[in-house]
Amino acid sequence: MSELTIWTYDWVPEAVWGFVRDLRLRWACEEAGLSYDVRTVPFDGRESNHLARQPFGQIPFLDDGEVKLFESGAGLLHLARKSETLMPLDPAGAAETLQWTLAALNSIEMVSVPWWFLTVTGAADNQLTGWMGKRLDQLEQVLSEREWLAAGRFTVADLLMADVLRVEKVRAFGDRPASEAYILRATDRPAFRKAQADQAALFKAADMKRRAI
Ligand SMILES: N[C@@H](CCC(=O)N[C@@H](CS)C(=O)NCC(=O)O)C(=O)O
C-alpha cells in the first residue's frame, strides 16, 4: 500500500471520462514518480456520503499518511513539495510556479467553469463570453512567447493550466494556436497519457459492472 491515496468516484458518466479532476493528482504523481493508490467513494449519494472528507461532496481528495486534504489545487501543491520535477527549489522559480498555479485556478478556471456551465445548460445569451474570450486572448499572448509558464520548464502550473484549457468546449472556443500547441505539448507527455488511460480504465470497468447489474 502506498502512502499516497487519491480518492475519486466509483463511477461517472462516460461523457466525463478523462476529465474528472482526480486526473490532476494522478498526472502529478506520474510526473514525479510517486507511487499512489486510487480509492473510490460512491457517486450515488455524493451530496452527503463523504462530506467529512470533502465538504462540498466532490472529489478528488488526497491522503498522504496523516495528511488529508481536498481541493485539487491544494493536492497538487502538496505533491509539488515532494518533487522538484513539479516545482523548482529555487525561491524565484518556486514563486513563479505558485503564481501561475493560482492563475490557472483563480484567473482562468474561475471564468471557464461558469462559462462552460452556462454553455452546456443552453443559456441563450451567455453573459460570460466576453470575459472568457478576453482571458483566453491574454493567456494566448503569454503562451505565444514561452513554451511553459514558469521557471523556463514544465511545472505543476502547466499541469493545471493545461488541464483547465483542454476541456473540450473551452478548447474549441476561438482560434488560439499558441494555446492549442501548449495543450498538445502538455497532454503528449507520457505521465498525462498514463494518468488518463488509468482513469478511463477504472471508469470503464465500473460502467460495465453497473450495466451488468
Ligand atoms: N474546486 C474543486 C472542484 C472539484 C470538482 O468540481 N469535482 C467534480 C469532479 S471533477 C465533482 O466532484 N463533481 C460532482 C459534484 O459537484 O457534485 C477541486 O478542484 O477539487
Image (tube, rainbow, N blue to C red):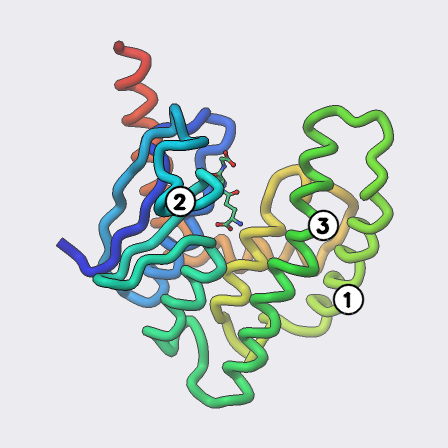
Left-right relation of 21 to 145 = left
Give the residue pinned by disc 1.
141
Q: Which mark is residue 196?
A: 2
Instruction: Characterize the local packing of mark 2: few (<14), some (14-19) or many (20 or more) Cα atoms within 10 angstroms.
Output: many
User: As rendered, which of 177 and 64 lies closer to the eye?
Assistant: 64
Q: Residue 31: tell me if it is visible.
A: yes
> Looking at the picture, how far across and down is residue 47, in whole percent?
45, 31
Q: Residue at x 82, y 51 (%)?
A: 131
Distance from Cα at disc 1 to Cα at disc 2:
28 Å
Q: Nearer the viewer, mark 1 or mark 3?
A: 3
Image marks 1 and 3: residues in contact by CB distance under 8 Å: no
> Looking at the picture, how far across and down is residue 112, in whole percent?
69, 47
Q: Is residue 124 above or below residue 170?
A: above
Q: Residue at x 68, y 56 (%)?
A: 108
Q: Residue 171: tell me if it is visible.
A: no
Q: Nearer the viewer, mark 3 or mark 2?
A: 3
